[in-house]
């Protein structure tokens, strides 16, 4: 595990609330730069970026955003370990850490069986694969100047990966989770490691419309065993995860309603043991997403 001083410094850099997005990658770099600079000015502590086979490559994408900001932490949420070998990940992260004064955080994940098999890899033992990847990263000799290595977090939902995150990283970045999961994750990690769950939100007070938006988002994830197995561990039934998700599950995964309601959900994660919450706002376009994030910042979500 990373040292306590390193972890405490990372918690300060991240702040209490950040933004998680997968939509910026599809926009021109010029738009992304403006968006990142605005999110920094709104007081969010970090910007988390996803990676898919169709998106910008994660470390290159991070460099675009780091270059457009001065204080904002940029974190991969996550960089897929099957998309680049461990040496490339270690050296790329080190280059960004050195160039941008420690504002880069390397979030790593094992992705999901369909995406991994499409790349020609075997997904049978994800925890073992992550451990071996971290071993190879640690064995990499980086020749450039490096005042401080980039912090790393692991995408982790269940006990074994959470324990690995505590043992071999600065902490964990769970996705598609509830405050109840956050409490379990904190217990598995122990008191020190960073716990930075993602929380999806919809700024809409109409129940039918908000849940419809949420179900469109949830459809992909409810088809992936990593997430459904985790939900079953938390006590959700087969009926809850079927058919796009029960209303109760939708409401538990996606916070919707007035800004104050969304802030309450963020506080619930923090009260359950999170150090930092990554807010993913669902909207029709990236510009609409930015508008919602402005509204949330104006009511104090960045300092809940």
Image (cartoon, rainbow, N blue to C red):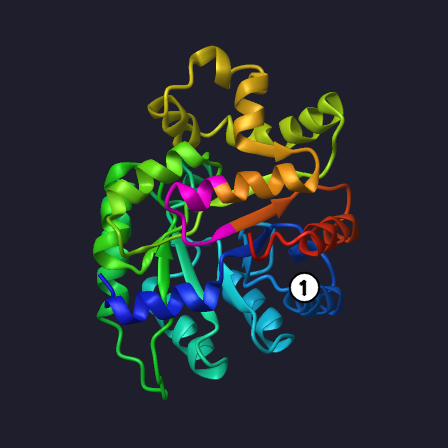
Say if 70 sits above or below 192 in the image: below
Q: In the drawing, does residue 41 fall left or right of residue 63?
A: right
Say if 203 sits above or below 95 in the image: above
Q: In the drawing, does residue 111 fall left or right of residue 254?
A: left
**Foreground of the two, 156 or 18:** 18
Q: Percent position (x, y) of residue 276?
A: 46, 54
Residue at figure coordinates x 25%, y 66% from the top left: 4
Q: Is residue 175 visible?
A: no
Residue at figure coordinates x 31%, y 60% from the top left: 170
In magenta, the rendered stretch is 268-277
Instruction: Name the residue that disc number 1 marks.
Output: 42
Q: Percent position (x, y) of residue 76?
A: 48, 59
Q: Secondary structure at mark 1?
A: loop
Q: In the drawing, does residue 78 fall left or right of residue 125?
A: right
Q: Is residue 285 visible?
A: yes
Residue 201 sits in quarter: top right
């Amino acid at each position: 595990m990373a040292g306590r001083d390193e972890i405490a410094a990372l918690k300060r850099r991240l702040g209490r609330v950040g933004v998680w997005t997968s939509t910026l990658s599809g926009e021109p770099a010029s738009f992304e730069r403006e968006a990142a600079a605005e999110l920094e000015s709104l007081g969010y502590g970090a910007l988390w970026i996803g990676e898919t086979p169709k998106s910008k490559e994660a470390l290159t994408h991070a460099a675009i955003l780091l270059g457009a900001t001065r204080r904002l932490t940029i974190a991969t949420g996550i960089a897929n370990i099957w998309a680049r070998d461990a040496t490339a990940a270690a050296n790329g992260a080190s280059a960004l850490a050195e160039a941008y004064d420690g504002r880069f955080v390397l979030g790593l994940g094992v992705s999901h069986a369909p995406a991994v098999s499409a790349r020609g890899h075997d997904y049978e033992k994800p925890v073992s694969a992550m451990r071996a990847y971290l071993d190879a990263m640690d064995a990499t000799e980086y020749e450039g100047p490096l005042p401080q290595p980039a912090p790393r977090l692991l995408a982790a939902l269940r006990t074994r990966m959470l324990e690995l995150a505590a043992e071999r990283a600065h902490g964990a970045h769970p996705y598609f989770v509830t405050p109840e999961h956050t409490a379990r994750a904190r217990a598995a990690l122990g008191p020190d490691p960073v716990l930075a769950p993602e929380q999806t939100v919809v700024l809409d007070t109409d129940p039918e419309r908000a849940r419809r938006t949420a179900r469109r988002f949830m459809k992909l994830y409810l088809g992936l065993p990593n997430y459904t197995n985790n939900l079953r561990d938390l006590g959700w039934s087969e009926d809850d995860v079927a058919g796009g998700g029960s209303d109760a599950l939708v409401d538990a995964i996606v916070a919707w309603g007035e800004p104050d309601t969304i802030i309450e959900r963020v506080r619930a994660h923090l009260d359950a043991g999170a150090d930092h919450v990554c807010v993913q706002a669902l909207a029709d376009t990236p510009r609409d997403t930015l508008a919602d994030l402005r509204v949330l910042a104006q009511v104090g979500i960045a300092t809940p």
